Amino acid sequence: MFSRQNALAITLLRLAGVFLLSVSWALAAERYSSIVDSGSGGSRIYLFMTDTDSNGYPTVTEVPLPDNKVSPGISAFVGDPGKVGPYLQPLINTLTAKLSELGVSQNQVGFSLFATAGMRVESPVSQNAVYQEVTKVVRESTQLDIQHVQTIQGRYEGAFEWLTLNYLKGTLPAKMSDTYGVLEVGGGSFQMSFHSATKSRNALDNVAFQYGPETITLFSRSYTGLGGNYSRYQYTDNQNCFPKDYPLPSGAVGTGRFDRALDAVKKLFNAHRTRISSSVEVPALSRFVGLGAFKDTADFFGIGGKISVNELQSVGKTFAETPWGKLLEKYPNDPYLFLEAYNAAYLSELLDVWFKADEKLPVDGKIDGIKIAWPLGAALFYAANNQMQ
């Protein structure tokens, strides 16, 4: 006879089954991934916990890691890849120690190393030799699940930065008109990435990917060689690009003629593919966020949270005309002091290519204490089951 007690027991068993299924699904969806950002100036390792929310959108939480950066950039080892092991070992040790602390098995954690502009300028043969050594070192010293070890195209670096920025700002998922574009100046390259209602006629300017149930297409372009350091190397002996009386490697001294520095840098941008297809609608500068050197330069000159061509040229002129000795007295412990006149000229001319002189660019480096860095965007990209094309 089917009693009330039997019915209750069956109901409880069914509820328990549903609960266990839900828990097992959550455990399966929640996973860890580690990403090494090998930029032109150094390598930094990140650990992320990734998941999928109830609407199918990816979620990422960064797990802070101590001592997570080494220098120089990994491209320094293209001539001697055997040194990659000792170079990467501190990062590997930091990661494995944190996994042990969390009680997470290494074989459940994906490992990727992505190099950027510093490796884009090296030959594929040299790159592969370094990457083979990276794979060997990680495989021999850990049980991590090696997923990607490669150089990424600059357009994907820009797209990942766009994902990071808008994810942290809370503009994803949202209407694309509510999202922010990214202007980011690194050491070796400059990235420009934003959403446009129409695609560029140049296929290499477009990056399309899934974000949960949505397909997002970005205009994303990278300029290798136009990063803060790589571009400056071309002006090392240009007297007009440095403060008055600054001692140049050639034996000459800086003139502090900021107007001439602007003319010199303008020629650099004129020589590159700066024109954007007329089919692409570029947002107003206020709908971008400046990262990297934009933020650093704004902080140095005390401009605040927004900068413009006019402001950069004003502070740059005053700085360049100040004799080098007086600058050293004012900033005695700044190892990057000699860069600031050039940075002001370079960034103002960069913005002047696409925007009006009085438009203001918001600048930032962190949101709610989290650094705006492309690896978080890469974690979102792969959590949504995308692949780079």
Image (tube, rainbow, N blue to C red):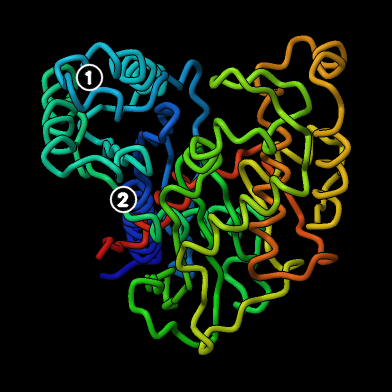
Q: From this viewpoint, is residue 5 visible?
A: no
* x and y, in percent, of residue 278 in the image: 53, 88
User: Residue 249 — which label?
Assistant: none
- Residue indicated by mark 1: 84
101 shown above or below 352: above
How packed is label 2: few (under 14 Cα within 10 Å), some, or many (20 or more)? some
- Helix, strand, or loop for circle 2? loop
* x and y, in percent, of residue 342 in the image: 67, 38
Can you say which quadrant of the picture contains the C terminus?
bottom left
Query: In percent of the image, x 37 and y 70: which residue is there?
Result: 209
324 shown above or below 154: above
Kind of residue at disc 1: Val
Quadrant of res 388: bottom left
Measured in 3D between alpha carbons, the distance from the residue under mark 2 to the one under mark 1, in whole angstroms, is: 19 Å
351 shown above or below 55: above
User: Along the polypeptide, which appears first: circle 2 or circle 1?
Assistant: 1
- Helix, strand, or loop for circle 1? helix
Kind of residue at disc 2: Ile
- Could you say which is closer to the camera, residue 24 or residue 96? 96
* x and y, in percent, of residue 8 in the image: 40, 61
- Could you say which is closer to the camera, residue 126 or residue 15? 126
Query: In percent of the image, x 47 and y 57: which residue is there?
Result: 158
- Residue indicated by mark 2: 152
Query: In percent of the image, x 31 and y 50: which residue is there?
Result: 152
Can you say which quadrant of the picture contains the N terminus?
bottom left
Horizontal side of residue 4 vs 146, given as left or right: right
Q: How many marks?
A: 2
- Disc 2, disc 1: CB below 8 Å? no
* x and y, in percent, of residue 178 in the image: 68, 74
- Could you say which is closer to the camera, residue 113 or residue 314? 314
Q: From this viewpoint, is residue 282 visible?
A: yes
Query: In percent of the image, x 64 and y 67: which residue is there?
Result: 353
